[in-house]
Image (cartoon, rainbow, N blue to C red):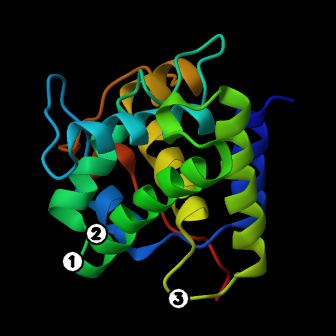
């Protein structure tokens, strides 16, 4: 089982509670249109975020998070959905990732080796388990949640990773009642 499958199974099995900002984004139907430019993040922050999301869902036999433009989805969340406090917390988390890489490897996260990048994220993951239940939520689990939602609600995630199967047929919302006989209901004996 690869990491992507494991994350999906764990998330579904545990029924992880969804952060309110993520729920608002899903309900709003937020997607990252093609050609969208960053609106909240700087280009450097956008590249850092794209790299982080790709480390969470890398390209395998299907495209990864970068190809699905998950970083643009998260930028849209930061701009349109997140509260000011949520936005500040997220941006501080990005800065913290870069600061941890500088402290551990003596270089920014983006120029660190892949092994150093993974080590930084593993350290953040271990700290997050110790801080479970804290408010605001630790950055890295929150980033993973946003990445999963952004990826699996994208066209790439829905059609290439999940193998979306369109139901054949059509919907006819104007069917005479006499033709169907009764509406859907439970036939409970009274």
Which residue carries the number 1 mark? 84
- Locate the C terminus by quadrant: bottom right
190 over 161 or under it: above or below:
below
Could you tell me if residue 153 is visible in this image?
no
Which residue carries the number 3 mark? 135
Which residue carries the number 2 mark? 87
| Nearer-the-camera pick, 156 or 123 | 123
How packed mark 3 is, by other alpha carbons closer than 10 Å (few <14, some 14-19, many 20 or more), is few
| Nearer-the-camera pick, 65 or 22 | 65
Image point 79% across, 42% down: which residue?
6
Q: Earlier in the sequence, mark 3 or mark 1?
A: 1
Decide if residue 112 is on the left or right side of residue 99. Answer: right
Residue 116 location, quadrant: top right
107 over 164 or under it: above or below:
below
User: Which element type, helix, strand or loop, lies under badge 3?
Assistant: loop
Could you tell me if residue 117 is visible in this image?
yes
Q: Position of residue 166 (x, y in %)?
A: 44, 23
| Nearer-the-camera pick, 15 or 190 | 15
Residue furthest front as drawn: 106
Decide if residue 91 is on the left or right side of residue 144. Answer: left
> Is there CB contact under 8 Å for labels 3 and 2?
no
Decide if residue 121 is on the left or right side of residue 180. Answer: right
Q: Count numbered badges in the picture.
A: 3
> Is there CB contact under 8 Å for labels 1 and 2?
yes
Q: Earlier in the sequence, mark 3 or mark 2?
A: 2
User: Which element type, helix, strand or loop, lies under badge 2?
Assistant: helix
């Amino acid at each position: 089982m690869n990491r992507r499958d494991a994350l999906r199974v764990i998330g579904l099995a545990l029924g992880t509670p969804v952060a309110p900002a993520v729920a608002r984004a899903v309900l709003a139907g937020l997607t990252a249109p093609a050609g969208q430019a960053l609106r909240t993040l700087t280009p450097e922050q956008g590249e850092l975020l794209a790299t982080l999301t790709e480390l969470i869902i890398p390209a395998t036999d299907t495209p990864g998070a970068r190809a699905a433009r998950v970083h643009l989805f998260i930028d849209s969340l930061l701009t349109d959905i997140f509260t000011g406090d949520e936005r500040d917390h997220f941006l501080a988390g990005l800065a913290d990732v870069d600061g941890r890489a500088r402290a551990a490897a003596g270089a920014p996260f983006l120029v660190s080796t892949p092994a150093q990048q993974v080590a930084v994220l593993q350290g953040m993951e271990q700290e997050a388990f110790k801080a479970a239940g804290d408010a605001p939520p630790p950055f890295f689990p929150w980033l993973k949640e946003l990445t999963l939602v952004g990826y699996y609600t994208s066209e790439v995630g829905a059609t290439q990773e999940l193998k979306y199967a369109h139901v054949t047929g059509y919907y006819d919302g104007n069917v005479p009642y006499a033709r169907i006989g009764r509406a859907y209901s439970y036939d409970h004996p009274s």
